[in-house]
Image (cartoon, grey):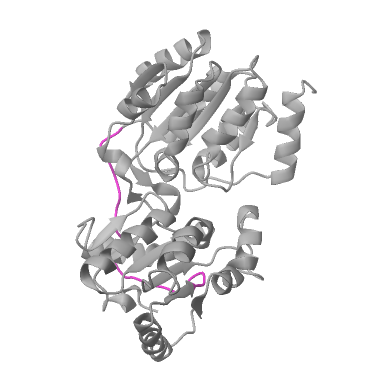
């Protein structure tokens, strides 16, 4: 299926997904980030609300794209705002189906994949699955059915299987930063020692795992948040409050921070003295393709100060990063460090070879002081 099969629509918003990469590339090729037609949202729930606003202003049907992991974020605006028994706001959701039953995927996607269609049914969204063999005529026919539903204020979805979409052009994503994320994480790991580290979803956790593996350090100090994007800092806060004698480090990403930025406000209000929150900022959703985030155009350090972080630094070189890490290691006080990062990773980057439950048990044993 060609990625431009939705060319009849003129407003798109959402959060990128690797299985929707052809669609995302087509949107960037056609619209870039022209907000009149395309808004990359902080999270999927926000995208649904932006779409609702578009409909209120135009009377037209918007498109929200997302990975199925974002279904949880849309439940509230779909059920309490868009549903036809509330405001009746029509919308088309395009959902990348990670963890589809019978298709190998990473552990964080398995259960989500099993309940993807059921969740659509539970929140009254009509869903049609598009795969490699789906004919364009089938999609056109389904769109005709959907138009009748939209007239009644209903929401509908296309659920996209792996490899179902294609787009000939490949959009290149880059920035002017020079530090690589893997080297940034290597510098962080050299300073944290035996302190607990909570790392964010995506390539950051994969790189941290491989760095520990290469250095024969073991993995007990690290909690790898393989799913639950945007919640690493909250997990770390929960640990830090119960283990005040330990310094807890967070390796976060810009897309993850944006997804649930309210967590920074709570962190600053609670103000634990034993937390170092590091955001590796490349201004991109790199793990799922590279589409830009809003973090490339905002000042995260100012936000951290406004939220109440006591010590704030921004590093665009390894010298500055090392100095900030050394200071954070030596002192008490809630600390925020932004590390400006280039886009890109090793082509042979692997994945953790331990299971999520093994990771949890080793991390908990470390926190209990067990070897």
Tell me residue 110's x, y (percent). 65, 60
Can you see residue 106?
yes
Exactly how many numbered labels are in the figure? Answer: 0
Q: Is residue 343 above or below residue 51?
A: above
Tell me residue 149's x, y (percent). 40, 83
Q: Main secondary structure of the magenta part?
A: loop
Q: Which residues are magenta?
A: 160-177
For the C terminus, which image quadrant? top right
User: Closer to the camera, 216 or 369?
Assistant: 369
Q: Is residue 81 above or below residue 187?
A: below
Q: Is residue 364 magenta?
A: no
Q: Is residue 146 above or below residue 100?
A: below
Q: Is residue 368 left or right of residue 268?
A: right
User: Closer to the camera, 317 or 273?
Assistant: 273
Q: Is residue 37 above or below residue 340?
A: below
Can you see residue 199?
no
């Amino acid at each position: 299926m060609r990625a431009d099969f939705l060319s009849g629509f003129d407003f798109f918003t959402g959060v990128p997904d690797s299985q929707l990469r052809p669609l995302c590339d087509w949107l960037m090729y056609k619209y870039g980030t022209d907000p009149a037609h395309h808004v990359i949202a902080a999270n999927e729930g926000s995208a649904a609300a932006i779409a609702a606003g578009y409909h209120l202003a135009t009377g037209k049907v918007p498109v929200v794209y997302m990975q199925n992991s974002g279904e949880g974020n849309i439940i509230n605006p779909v059920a309490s705002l868009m549903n036809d028994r509330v405001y009746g706001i029509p919308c088309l959701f395009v959902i990348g189906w990670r963890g589809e039953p019978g298709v190998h995927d990473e552990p964080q996607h398995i259960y989500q994949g099993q309940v993807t269609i059921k969740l659509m049914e539970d929140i009254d969204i009509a869903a049609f699955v598009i795969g490699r063999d789906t004919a364009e005529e089938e999609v056109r026919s389904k769109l005709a059915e959907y138009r009748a539903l939209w007239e009644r204020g209903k929401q509908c979805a296309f659920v996209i299987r792996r490899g179902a979409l294609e787009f000939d052009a490949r959009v290149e994503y880059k920035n002017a930063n020079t530090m690589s994320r893997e080297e940034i994480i290597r510098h962080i790991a050299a300073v944290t020692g035996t302190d607990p580290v909570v790392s964010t979803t995506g390539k950051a956790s994969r790189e941290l795992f491989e760095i520990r593996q290469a250095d024969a350090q073991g993995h007990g100090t690290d909690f790898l948040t393989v799913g639950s994007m945007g919640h690493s800092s909250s997990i770390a806060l929960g640990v830090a409050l119960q283990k005040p004698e330990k310094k807890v480090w967070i390796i976060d990403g810009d897309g993850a921070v944006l997804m649930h930025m309210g967590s920074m406000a709570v962190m600053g209000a609670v103000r634990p003295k034993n937390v170092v929150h590091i955001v590796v900022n490349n201004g991109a959703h790199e793990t799922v393709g590279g589409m830009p985030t809003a973090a490339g155009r905002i000042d995260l350090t100012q936000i951290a100060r406004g939220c109440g972080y006591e010590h704030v630094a921004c590093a665009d070189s390894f010298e500055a990063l090392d100095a900030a890490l050394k200071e954070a290691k030596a002192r008490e006080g809630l600390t925020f460090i932004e590390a400006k990062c280039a886009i890109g990773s090793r082509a042979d980057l692997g994945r953790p070879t331990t299971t999520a439950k093994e990771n949890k048990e080793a991390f908990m044993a470390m926190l209990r002081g067990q070897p």
